[in-house]
Amino acid sequence: MSKEWWKSSARGIPEIKTPLPGPRSNELSQKTSRYFKGLSSQVKLFPVCFAEGHGITLTDVDGNRYLDFSSGIYVTSLGHCHPKISEAVAHWAKTLMNCHDFSTPVKEKLVEKVAQVLPGNLNGMQLYSDGTTAVEAALRAARVITGKHEFISCFRDFHGKTLGAVSCARMARGGVLSYAPTRAPGFYMVPRPDPYRPLFTCADGTIDTDAYIDFYREFILEGTAGNVAAFVLEPAQGWAGSIFPPDDFFPKLKKLCDELGILLLDDEILAGMGRTGELLCLQHWNTLPDIVTFGKSFGNGFPVTAMIVKEEYAEALEQISASSSYGGNPMACAAALASLEVIEEEDILQNTQEVGAYLMQRMQKMQQEHPIVGHVKGKGLLLGIELVKDKGTKEPFDRAGELVYQKAFASGLAWIPAGHILRMSPPLIIDTHHAGMGLDIIEEAIASVEKEFGY
Ligand SMILES: Cc1ncc(COP(=O)(O)O)c(C=O)c1O
């Protein structure tokens, strides 16, 4: 199959035929939200109703065609309805949908493939159907492996919405205590180096990663019961707005973890599967985790996730009652296997690096030229633009973030807001032409908002 399979459906996008959201979108969104509650801010800010997706193109119920810059929230990274993946799922949908955790030919192929493509000896695994369940299983595995029960995660991390996962993140969102009256016992959070907003700096003002590591060491001694099983981390913080730590952070953290007998639990649900130009994001820093979670784009839209541990820890999975009703069903395995094959067959990692470098160089220019673009960041196609009211004070400009999101969407760019940070995660199959087109739309929206606020 040609790598260009998505190009014919992308011809002429974005194509806007009605004011957006269109009349049918409005009608169906309103009817849906009569019963379907708890919508995300991205839907509330732009209530469109989608009918079809193909490659990098999304079509709404009014026939408007959008350029996809979110990959269905980091999920459909290889393009909507990739023919190879859709066919693989369809085959098993007609052959065998579920048989609990018995082996199937496609599961056997998938687990071999995962063990082969991951670095090191990450090869003991279990499969699930959402990210948060994989994270819970990873937490349980870490407890069994170490015999310890506490966890440390980092400010601005996000790991899912079940009890253990929410205990690794901020309790309140948007001013609402969304997750629990309190985090589960034994879960702690610490600051992590954000190059644009460092807490610990050297005398010359540069970020001081050693100070973060020293703080963790002290915190573990003073603030925990000395029973930390794992550091739970996103290699790049996605929900927080594509925040990458300095290059020396993860190697130093892994060294600390090894010294203290703490596992590094690497949640690659958002940043893995090639999103940053490496299969595992942590590979950018030559750091090998002890436990990894995969999700979102693992099945390119079919719900399938994984929790994988190093070979020496694989037996621990016998003790966590690891299986689930849907995890590893044949359709799920087929989707994940086909996705891993597409990454190789279509040189996805290389494309991601090339298109990402092109966008980054353009974003750096935008940072110089636009008064409200405070910071640009990213690796591969996990990118972010931070909007500020003033480059000196770095005060977050949330209202500008909302307006830029809505204006760009109204011009035909389907994407994701995150307060004052503009998040971009286009499909990894995209070429520089279409990626540049998306950034043009964003830049126009930024310029229009700057004008509106009198910059
Ligand atoms: C890093 C990370 N971990 C876990 C999750 C939870 O995944 P799911 O929504 O599939 O439960 C997410 C979802 O956004 C995520 O970004």
Image: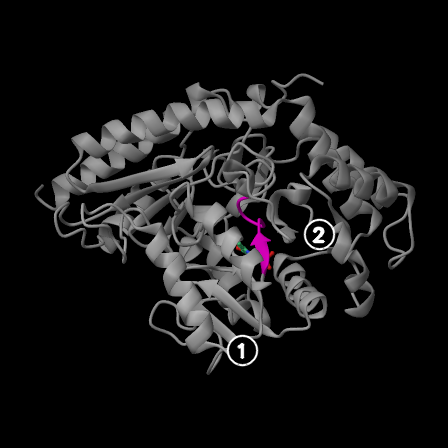
Is 381 one of the magenta-colored residues?
no
CA–CA distance in space, label 1 to label 2:
23 Å
Between 127 and 51, the residue placed more toward the observer is 127
Residue at numbered disc 1: 186
Give the x, y percent position of residue 11: 50, 20
The image quadrant in which ligand 1 is located:
bottom right
Left-right relation of 6 to 369: right
Among the two numbered marks 1 and 2 on one chain, the one whose residue lies closer to the N terminus:
1
Secondary structure type for disc 2: strand
Residue at numbered disc 2: 308
Give the x, y percent position of residue 235: 50, 48
Secondary structure type for disc 1: loop
Left-right relation of 251 to 52: left
**Residue 13 in view (yes/no):** no
- Whether 70 is drawn above or below 46: the answer is above
* Residue type pointed to by label 2: Ile
Give the x, y percent position of residue 228: 56, 70
**Residue 91 in view (yes/no):** yes
